[in-house]
Image (tube, coloured by chain):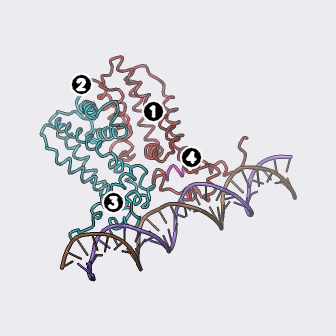
Chain colours: A red, B cyan, C brown, D purple
Amino acid sequence: MARKMGSHAEITGPRIHSAALGLFARHGYAAVSMRQIASEVGVQAGAIYQYTSDKQSLLFGLMDGHMDALLAAWSAVPVRPDPMARLRDFCEFHIRYHLDRPEAVFIAYMELRNLTPENFKVIEEKRRRYEASLTEILSAGVEREDFNLTDIHLTAMGIIAMLTGINTWFREDGRLDRRRVERIYWRLVRRMVTAG
Amino acid sequence: MARKMGSHAEITGPRIHSAALGLFARHGYAAVSMRQIASEVGVQAGAIYQYTSDKQSLLFGLMDGHMDALLAAWSAVPVRPDPMARLRDFCEFHIRYHLDRPEAVFIAYMELRNLTPENFKVIEEKRRRYEASLTEILSAGVEREDFNLTDIHLTAMGIIAMLTGINTWFREDGRLDRRRVERIYWRLVRRMVTAG
DNA sequence: GGTTGAACTGAACATCTGTTCAGTTACGGT
DNA sequence: ACCGTAACTGAACAGATGTTCAGTTCAACC
């Protein structure tokens, strides 16, 4: 069953996914038609169904792929035992990873309601696992008394919301570059977890 | 031109808006048809056009009304001169106001891309004004040296993202009630603005 | 050079879309 | 009792929707 063939056979599949990514991010899943996706790839609508069974599974594929890549990338970050250092790694990782993929991130947050219940559960569980990796850091820090927190879970939610929010306003040619944003946000997070 | 009339004349208009609010929040603007809205109100699709010229202006009306109400409600909060107290007022106001209107908040954040460019500008400007009211508090606190901040604008963005994020996970019957959430988040915000 | 088979077309499908509008209904004012 | 008029219906419009599928194309293999 190894894939054989055609010069464009290798290219059309990925191109459909990337066209869908861009269009879903710009206009929203419901507002984008299969014909729009197809025309962006330079193909007829029917051709898409050779790579995808459904419009729904096209969306799910994008979101699930994003979540898997996110979890894999975070797993690849070497674990430092010091909770403060680990928390810093998380913040920097999160900011960079999300700023590098604004479209996938946007879809992952905005199109949850367009997933079928079963697909939703899958994505939600992966998101939960990612968030859990942050609460584990916070727990470790609290246990060592490096962190001083009233509520670990709420702090985790607050941190993630704050960091992800960067994507809504950050512009590559804006007043501050990525590194500066990273540093400023890290200061904020560090303050959040340490007693004043 | 005072409105006269019909027992349901007084009721259908508002009912359309509230049906649209709920449906747009649940399924998204693009995924909701005029017929769905109408059937929720118990009316034919054509009847909606007696209260709204467009599907677009139905969305814009909801978002603009929400932003106006938000700005008005915040303006109604008495101004305390102490920046720390004022910041606390802002946080509590923001959390309460947003938790009270999850559907309108959801739409205001998610449906921006479905606005025409002109309508988008109007909403964006009102959001900017709301955010500016927070940066003003932070500026005042920095000037008095009550706050210690690396970047006022980024801090404001971080605070707002964190507070608004509550809406994504808060459940009225959850582990923590509103008051507790308010207090925990206020601690986080206070730490963010004061030197550690 | 003929055969295979994947990639793709183009038309068709049933249904849905936002919006309009000529009529019908029903009710307050006279 | 009748008028005026706002509210609403129901059908129609032109076009778009996701999806299917009988064909066509064309490069790779024997």
Left or right placement of residue D6 versus residue A115 in this view? left
What are the residue bounds of the magenta stretch? A17-23
In whole angstroms, how far apart are the C-alphas of marks 1 and 2? 30 Å
**Mark closest to the chain's N terminus, 1 or 2:** 1
Residue under numbered circle 3: B119
Residue assigned mark 2: A196
Residue D26: give x, y in percent of width and height.
73, 58
- Indicate the quadrant where residue A141 lies: top left
Q: Is there CB contact under 8 Å for labels 4 and 1?
A: no
Q: Which residue is mark 4?
A: A57
Q: Is residue A188 above or below residue B47?
A: above
Q: Which secondary structure, mark 2?
A: loop
Q: Residues within 10 Å of mark 4 (few under 14, many from 20)?
A: some
| Residue A187 can be seen in this image | no
Query: At 37% across and 23% down in the image, what residue appears?
Result: A84
Mark 1: secondary structure: helix
